[in-house]
Amino acid sequence: MLRYLPFLLVLALWIYAFIDCLNTPEEEVRGLPKVVWVIIILLFGEVLVGPVAWLVAGKARRAPVGGGAPGEPSRGRRAEWVAPDDNPEFLKSLKENKGEDKKDDEALLKDWEADLRRREDELKRRESGEDPQPPQA
């Protein structure tokens, strides 16, 4: 089993480089046209020259996302938020919606309390014998 491992690693690298080349937009390809890179990867895949050449020299790599203050776009790119609580607009929308939700919750709570009082009154009347009919659900 161990003797097949190098072959599987070469195959995995070859497939990764091929799919990465196909999925890369044309404007991010460096050096040669995209079609030429696909041919190089396919022709020289079994000796690792094609896939390694693509990964080293063929694709323009992006700078890391970090580097600036949290929440600021880095180097002219739009901000890529990691989680919703990192996004100031999302947090602002939560604060705005909180007042409306609180009003809705208070109205719902008042309705529940009124319904509970009504049921308690009906139950007391039934137990005292004033209202022989069970309430209609």
Image (tube, rainbow, N blue to C red):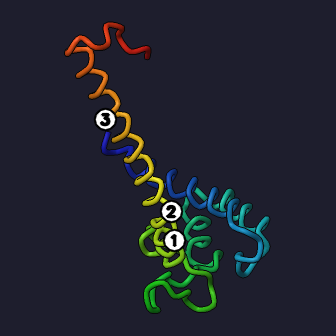
Report x, y in % for residue 61.
58, 79
Q: Amino acid at mark 3?
A: Arg
Q: Can you tell which of label 2 and label 1 is closer to the viewer?
A: 2
In the displayed structure image, the side of residue 81 where residue 75 appears, left or right: right
In the picture shown, does residue 72 fall above or below 106?
below
Secondary structure, mark 2, is helix
Question: How far, Cα to Cα, is label 1 from label 3?
Answer: 33 Å
Q: Which residue appears at 39% of the width and 47% of the height?
A: 110
In the displayed structure image, the side of residue 121 where residue 32 appears, left or right: right
Name the residue beneath numbered marker 3. Answer: 117
Question: How far, Cα to Cα, is label 2 from label 1?
Answer: 8 Å
Name the residue beneath numbered marker 1. Answer: 96
Q: Quadrant of residue 66?
A: bottom left
Q: Quadrant of residue 86?
A: bottom left
Q: Closer to the camera, 25 or 16? A: 25
Q: Closer to the camera, 98 or 127? A: 127
Mark number displayed over residue 54: none
Q: Which residue appears at 63% of the width and 80% of the height?
A: 60
Name the residue beneath numbered marker 2. Answer: 100
Q: Which residue appears at 58% of the width and 65% of the height?
A: 51
Q: Amino acid at mark 1?
A: Glu
Mark 1 crowdedness (10 Å alpha carbons): few <14, some 14-19, many ≥20 = few
In the picture shown, does residue 112 fall above or below 28?
above
In the displayed structure image, the side of residue 131 where residue 57 appears, left or right: right
**Residue furthest top in the image:** 132
Mark 3 crowdedness (10 Å alpha carbons): few <14, some 14-19, many ≥20 = few
Report x, y in % for residue 107.
45, 51
**Residue furthest left in the image:** 128
Question: How far, Cα to Cα, is label 3 from label 2?
Answer: 26 Å
Is label 2 in contact with label 1 (beta carbons under 8 Å)? yes
Q: Amino acid at mark 2?
A: Glu
